[in-house]
Amino acid sequence: MGTTILKIFTSNFVSKLYIDTLNECLIRTADVYYPEGWILQEDNSPVHKSKLSKEWKDSENILVLDWPAYSPDLYPIENIWGVLKQRLSKRSLNNLADLEVAIIYEWETFTPDFLKNFILSMPNRVNMCINSGGEKINY
């Protein structure tokens, strides 16, 4: 059982596509797992920061975490992508279709408990960042 819906894109990722993805994939899942409310964490992608995206998130009352713009070491999703890449590197993939099937298969093995460990690491990450004076941390 996967934890969220995974969507694979073959075109440029623009604001409208981002909004459609949030609406179709994230909101439905987040509302099920966190019925009392949730906060969205985004990086500094222009798609996330566009006027269209901001207006849509405001209209949907989506709370966005105020977070340093360039800090991939503090984003749990980056570690999850790393695990996914590591698992994929062990497979023999011959074409794009094989890759897509493998990505979806691996994504669906990520359980809430597996992902929870990355979330629970956040206080430690933030403390490491503070102790390093805001410099990049190895996490």
Image (cartoon, rainbow, N blue to C red):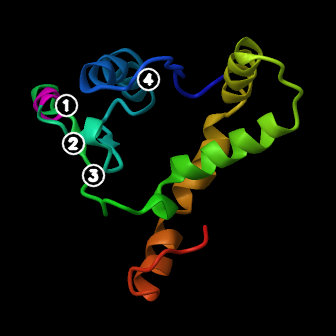
Identify the amino acid type marked 4. Answer: Thr
**Residue 71 spot, x, y in % from top left:** 41, 63
Residue identified by numbered label 4? 29
**Residue 21 spot, x, y in % from top left:** 37, 20
Q: Quadrant of residue 27?
A: top left
Q: Is residue 103 left or right of residue 21?
A: right
**Residue 4 spot, x, y in % from top left:** 52, 26
Q: State the separation of the CA atoms marked 3 and 2.
A: 13 Å
Nearer the observer: mark 1 or 4; the answer is 1
Q: Tell me, yes or no, whether the highlighted magenta stretch contains residue 21.
A: no
The image shows residue 111, relative to residue 135, as above or below, that is above
Nearer the observer: mark 3 or 2; the answer is 2
- Badge 4 local density, few (<14 within 10 Å), some, or many (20+)? some
- Specify which label sits upstream in the sequence, 3 or 1: 1
Magenta stretch bounds: 52-56
Q: Is residue 93 left or right of residue 85?
A: right
Residue identified by numbered label 3? 65
Residue identified by numbered label 2? 49
Q: State the separation of the CA atoms marked 4 and 2.
A: 22 Å
Where is the C terminus found, in terms of image quarters? bottom right
Identify the amino acid type marked 2. Answer: Lys
SS class of the residue under badge 4?
A: helix
**Nearest to the observer: residue 23 or residue 51:** 51
SS class of the residue under badge 1?
A: helix
Q: State the separation of the CA atoms marked 2 and 1.
A: 6 Å
Residue at 77%, 44% (x, y): give it. 86
- Specify which label sits upstream in the sequence, 1 or 4: 4
Q: State the separation of the CA atoms marked 3 and 4.
A: 18 Å
- Badge 2 local density, few (<14 within 10 Å), some, or many (20+)? some
Residue identified by numbered label 1? 53
Q: State the separation of the CA atoms marked 3 and 1.
A: 15 Å
- Specify which label sits upstream in the sequence, 3 or 4: 4
